[in-house]
Amino acid sequence: GQCITHCPVGALRERDDVMTVYDALADPDVTTIVQIAPSVRTAWGDHWGLKGDEATVGRLVAALRPMGFDYIVNTDFSADLTIMEEGSELLRHLPKSQAGGYPMFTSCCPGWVRFVKSHYPELVDDVSTSKSPQQMFGAIVKSYYAEYLGLDPHKIFSLSIMPCVAKKAEYAYPTMRDACGDPDVDCVLTVREVERMLRADHVDVRALGEEPFDEPLGIGTGAGVIFGATGGVMEAALRTAHYLVTGKAPAADMFSDVRGLRGWKEATFDLAGTKLRVAVASGLANADALCKAVVAGEVSYDFVEVMACPGGCVGGGGQPIHDGEELAGARGKALYGLDRVSKYRNSYENPDIVRCYQEYLGEPLSERAEELLHTDQHGWLMPSEWIAAAEAAPQA
Ligand code: SF4
C-alpha cells in the first residue's frame, strides 16, 4: 500500500491500499471477492450527500460491480456466523463466570483485543476465541465458498470494506491464516478509500439502482446488521443464546436494554432460570474502567462486549469524517431501523447459515469450525511482549 498525507506537516500518514486492489482487479488469473461490513451502509454515500434511504447497501453493490469485482458478499452473514460460534462459546463459559470467574469478553474488535493484550493480559484467556466477522468470512471464502464455486483458493483475492483502520492490522496477524499459510483476508479498504475509488472511476452513484449480493453467502439477519452499533453484538448473541438454551425464539426486542450510547451499560436477563449479568463498553476509557473494576472484583458479569470506538463501528476510524460532528448515534439508529424490518432477526434463522453448517461446518464449535473460525488470542505478541521475550532469551 501507499500512504496519503493529510497532516499539514506530513508527520502523520494514512495507509492507502487502493493500488493493491486495482492490481488485483487487473490480474486475469485472480478472482476478487469483496465483503461489505454492516456499518458501511450507514456512511458510504456521505460524499454524494445521499440520505440513509438512498445510500443503501444494494446501491453500493451496484456501484462496485462495474469496477470489476467478481463476487460481492455480505459481512452480515459472517456476523451471524460469529454469533453462532460466540453464543455457543458463551454457554460453555457460563459455569466459570457463575462460579466467580471472569466473564467472557467479545473478540470482534481488533482495537479492543490489542488493548486487553497490552493492558490486562490476565483477562486474555477469557476473550472469546471466535474470529471477527471479517476474518470468519475470509476463512469461509477460501474454503467452503471456493469449493462451492470450483475456484482455486490460492487464486482468490479476498477483500473487505470496513469502517475501521484497525482491521488492516487484524488481517495481517500470523494467526489469521489457513493451514497452507494463506491469509483469510488479502486486503482491507476503509469506507474513505472506497469513496476515493468510486470518485476516481467516475461512478455516478446517484444514477444507480440497487443490486443484490451474490449467493450463497449474501443473506444477513437483523442480528448481523446491529453488529455495527455498541451493544449490537451483545444483543445478537443473547438472541441466539436464548434460542440455544430454550429452543424458542426470543420475544422481539427482549434484550434492547443494552442499546444506546452510554459508554458503560449493564443489564441482567433471565436465561431459562440463570441470572445472566452482562455489560457493554464502548470507547477505550470506558473499557479501561470496566476491566479495572472486573480485575478488582468490584463488578461481576457473565458476558462483556467491548468496542474501541465510542458508539461502536458506526463511529469507526475508517468512516467518512465530518469535522465537529459526532454521527455514531444517528448511524446506530439507522442499523436498528434495518434490524426492525429484516426478514430474519436472529442469526440461527439465517438460511445461508443453516446451509453452511449442514453442508460444511457441522455444528458450532465442531472440529472444522474451530480450525477455520477460531483463533489463539495468545498466538501473536504485542511489542512489549517481544521485548520481554527477547530480554528473557539466553544471550549468544
Ligand atoms: Fe474497528 Fe472501532 Fe469497530 Fe473496533 S469499534 S472494530 S476499532 S471500527
Image: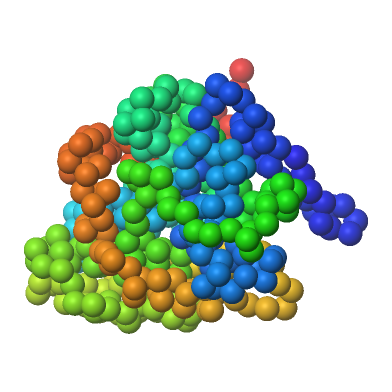
Residue nearer the viewer, 129 or 222: 222
Q: What x and y, as percent, mark residue 239? A: 24, 67
Residue depicted at x 71% and y 72%: 322
Residue at position x 27%, y 59% in the image: 347
Q: In front: 191, or 246?
A: 191
Tell me which colouring the rendered structure shows: rainbow
Q: Residue at x 63, y 61 (%)?
A: 207
The quarter of the rendered structure image containing the N terminus is top right
| Residue at 32%, 43% in the rendered image | 216
Q: Is residue 100 visible?
A: no
Question: From the viewer's perspective, is 47 left or right of 350?
Answer: right
Rendering coords of residue 62 (x, y %): 54, 52
Residue 121's place in the image compared with 261, above or below, is: above
Nearer the observer, 280 or 58: 58
* Residue at the outermost right position: 9
x and y, in percent, of residue 58 in the image: 48, 58
Compared to residue 213, the image places residue 40 above or below, namely: below
Where the C terminus falls, by quadrant? top right
- Asked whether 58 or 101 is in front, the reply is 58
In the picture as drawn, the residue positioned furthest to the top comes out as 396
Q: Is residue 220 visible?
A: yes
Pinpoint residue 195: horizontal percent, then vertical percent. Answer: 67, 55
Count of labels in the image: 0
39 vs 202, left or right, is left
Residue 251 horizontal side relative to residue 145, left or right: left
The reply, left or right, for residue 57 in relation to residue 106 is right
